[in-house]
Image (cartoon, rainbow, N blue to C red):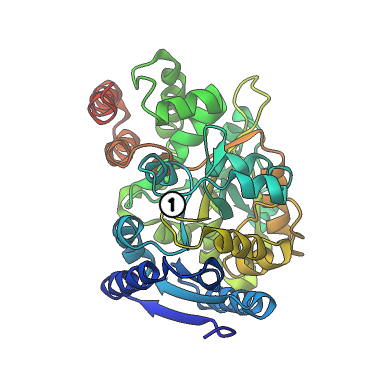
Amino acid sequence: MPGITRYTTMSRRGLLHTAGGLGLAAGALRGAPALAQSRAITVIADQSNAETRAIFAEIAAAYEADTGVSVTVNNMDHEAHKTAIRSYLAASPPDVCFWFSGNRMRAFVERGLFDDISDLFERENYYDVLGTSTETVSVGDRQFGLPLGGTLWGLFYRKDVFAEQGMTPPADWDGLLATCEQARGAGLTPMTLGTKELWPAAGWFDHLNLRINGLDRHMALMRGEMSYLDPSLQPVFDHWQDLIEREIFTPNHTSYSWQQAASFFVRKQSAMFVLGNFMTRAFPAEEKDQLAFVPFPRIGPETRRYEEFSVNSVHIPARAQNKDVAREFLAYFYRPENLGRFLRPDGNVPPRHDIPVPDDPMMRSLVEALRNADGTAQFYDRDTDPDMAQVGLRSFQEFMVAPDRRDTILERMEAARKRVFRA
């Protein structure tokens, strides 16, 4: 029914049933004139925020009104979507789907399941407006998706606590050590941490490795091209162990999720927190003006700055029935005014440089840090193979509890790398 966006919330089973039906319908249309096929597209999304879903439906409806193309949006539960996509991309793909960039996208590219949309990048001049964010959806020199809003990682602190204690946010390693000592002297836990869910520990490994060894060597490690026993990793673990032995982290951090650990930070019992900007959701609205962000401190003489920027993305499946209209819809959705509206409810950092920055000091700090970055990684469990990530995340948590086991831990990770990447 052209002119009305159909927006449904579906279970995995319901989605696969419907996708199968759509596939049969599309198959029946293959013999129909091309013009008829171009009047409808299907989108599979996984938006959990009701406001975000509503805005996307409005954008789709506006596109329908402008073009007459019918848009059906099937919204799935986020976790169920992670499983269902493996089936529907191969069996009955939609014309557009949401996913994750980086290694998770690469896995589907290598199986021939995502379409190369480098032509759309060229036509819409995305290379200029995206800058380093282009890397998040690239395999080689080709692009296979559009980066959506992202989570930028770095060091968060409370302005009121720092002002009360006369502390300044650290810009380098010596500054970090000095600020930790100052915080401890004020009766604060220097650094907030909760590793019950494992992955927060990986944020520390990623930042230290990016600062000490740079982006190229970090990504070589993520791709399994470099040994975990390589001597260049020893300074990374030396710096990390120094912090552990100085006891700067939340005691018994393995017992706390990041949200539980955040409560110590919110209640002014700890001074700093290295996490993604999603942590702002744990902060009371009436106190958010006290929250501030700086990039992770520099280490050594390296002047290039590489940051962690975890980016979701949107794609055209390789077996989509209506790729031309899917490209037109993505170009419409990706206009600065539309993408900016879509990203705002979740507070995600926009990847486009031409989206106006909201009048929010925190968002301005995040956008400035991203624009000044020389390159970005996604996050350990997004950048490396899922099986390697499982071993790595457990190993990083273990190292933070028992750094004296470093050699055993690294040997275990290296054995996993050889098995996973067949190195």
In the image, residue 335 above or below residue 110 = below
Question: In front: 147, or 191?
Answer: 147
Horizontally, residue 71 falls left or right of residue 13, namely: right
> Which residue is labeled 1 in the image?
318
In the image, residue 267 above or below residue 385 = below
Regarding residue 390, the answer to whether it shows in the image is yes
Residue 53 percent across, percent down from the top left: 52, 75
Residue 200 percent across, percent down from the top left: 41, 47
Q: Name the image quarter holding residue 290.
A: bottom right
Other-residue count near label 1 (Cα within 10 Å), few / some / many at <14 / 14–19 / ≥20: many
In the image, residue 88 above or below residue 214 = below
Residue shown at 43%/80% (left/top)? Answer: 8
Residue shown at 51%/69% (left/top)? Answer: 33
- Disc tally is 1
At numbered mark 1, what does the secondary structure look like: helix, strand or loop?
Answer: loop
Question: In front: 292, or 102?
Answer: 102
Horizontally, residue 173 falls left or right of residue 203, namely: right
User: Amino acid type of disc 1?
Assistant: Ala
Question: In front: 49, or 198?
Answer: 49
Horizontally, residue 116 falls left or right of residue 226, namely: right
Regarding residue 248, the answer to whether it shows in the image is no
Question: In front: 218, or 30?
Answer: 30
**Quarter of the picture holding the C terminus:** top left
Residue 382 percent across, percent down from the top left: 42, 44
Q: Name the image quarter holding residue 44.
A: bottom left
Residue 359 percent across, percent down from the top left: 77, 64
